[in-house]
Every structure is written in C-alpha cells, then in structure tokens.
Amino acid sequence: MSRAAQASTVSAGALETALLLALTGAAAPHPPRVERAGVAADGNQADGPPTDAAISADGRYVALPSTAPGPGCAQFFACLRGKDLTTGEVTGIDLGPGYAHRSPLLSTDAGRVAFTAGTRFPALLFNARGGLYGHDVRTGAVRRVADGRATVATDDGHRVAVADAGGPRVLDLRTGRSTAAGPAGAGAGKGALAAKGHAMTFSSDAADPVPDDTNGVSDVFVRHIH
C-alpha cells in the first residue's frame, strides 16, 4: 500500500471515530494513570502511612485509615478520612481521637461508610471490644451497629457480612436484624456477599452445614438467606 493510501485510510478511520463520538456523545477514554489519594486537601504529601483503603463504585471517593499526624491522626490509632478525588476535599468520617479505625466499606453511591473501630490497637486486631460502625455521609451521623468486623457490603450499603467468633453473618444496617450465615470458625472473603445480600458464600471444615459431608476437608458453601 502506498503512503498516500495509508494516510487516506488513517484519516478515514480518525474521521469515523470522531463522527461516532459526536453521534453517541461519548467522551474519549482517559489514558491509564496513577494518582495519590493519601494527600491533604491542599495536595501536600501525607506525613504518615495509610492502611486498607476502599473506593466507591464510580471511582470518585476513597475512604482510607491513616496514621499521618497532618490530618490529626495518631501513630498507633489510625483515623479514617474520606477523599473526593474530583474536588480534593478531605473529610473526617471517624469516631475521633482515641480510636483505631480499619476495614472501611463504601456503598455504591458513597453515601454510607461502614468501618471497624476499637479503643485499643490489639483489641481491634483480634475483634475484642472492637465494633462495626455505620457513617451516614449526608447527615454525618455515626452509630455502632454490631460487634465484629465487616468484610463486604451490598451495593446499596444496607447489608454487610460480619465476621466474629460465632461465625459469619449478614447484618441489615437499617433494621439491625442479623442472620447467621455459617458455623463458628467459618471464613468469608471480600466477594462473599451477593449484590442484594440474599446469599453468601463461606468456607468451613465443619461436617454439619449440609447432610452427608464426610470428606473431612474444608468445603465452600452457599447460605441462601431470602
């Protein structure tokens, strides 16, 4: 193919793409990039490390525990901050000084945040005296909703899977109703809860979740809740 023909083909392809974007109203995709979420509202670097962060479904909001003194956090008591990646605004969504925060979960619209908090760092790690809290971003209200730690939430933020000593369970944050999902010692990962909270997977080596379980090894089960 001649250079002229190649140029004509490229031009035709570019024109076709431009027309398609104009007709559909679609924007050209952004190139891959990396941005740092753990910075202050003015863009200054954090002066301490964050821990396990969570991001909203649309990629705009991030909730991150941090031990950076700059935003008012303590070295051994991670605070919890929300970051709007579009505006740069940073807000506090935690219980204040004296609590260590971790494991945030965001609803799809980022209107609700669930997190685990405890008054002592070792207690938080082992889920002793630590609790699960819910934060309403619109009203700013924070309330303790359960003992234990949330591992995953439904898209609407209404239900969470809670891990505690008694086994995994599904908690409705609106009503407080808790439904057992597995036996003591069972494990449930971050993808364990169905989008509407009606089913949950768990792994267990117990012999009694279903009849005739005689293989003597850990299995994966599905608990149908409603």
Image (spheres, rainbow, N blue to C red):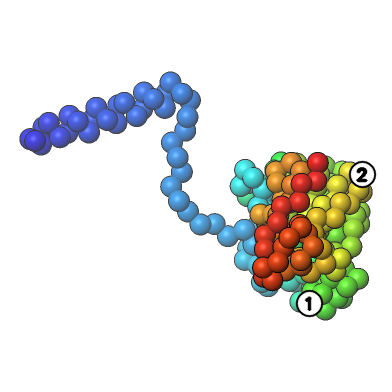
Mark 2 surroundings within 10 Å by alpha-carbon count, few (fewer than 14), some (14 through 19), many (20 or more):
few
Q: Where is residue 68 in the image (x, y as percent from the top left)?
A: 72, 70
Q: Position of residue 2 (x, y in %)?
A: 7, 35
Res 107 visible: no
> What amino acid is labelled 2 in the image?
Thr
Left/right of residue 7 with respect to residue 135 in the rendered view: left
Left/right of residue 5 with respect to residue 54 in the rendered view: left
Mark 1 or mark 2: which is in front? Answer: 2
Q: Where is residue 171 in the image (x, y as percent from the top left)?
A: 85, 51
Say which residue appears at 11% left-offset and 32% top-offset. Answer: 4
Q: Which of 140 and 181 is in front in this view?
A: 181
Which quarter of the rendered picture does the C terminus lie within? Answer: top right
Q: Residue 40 carries which label?
A: none
Res 55 visible: yes
- Quarter of the image for residue 202 reads bottom right
Left/right of residue 164 with respect to residue 52 in the rendered view: right
Name the secondary structure under disc 2. Answer: loop
Task: Report which residue position mark 1 lands on.
Answer: 76
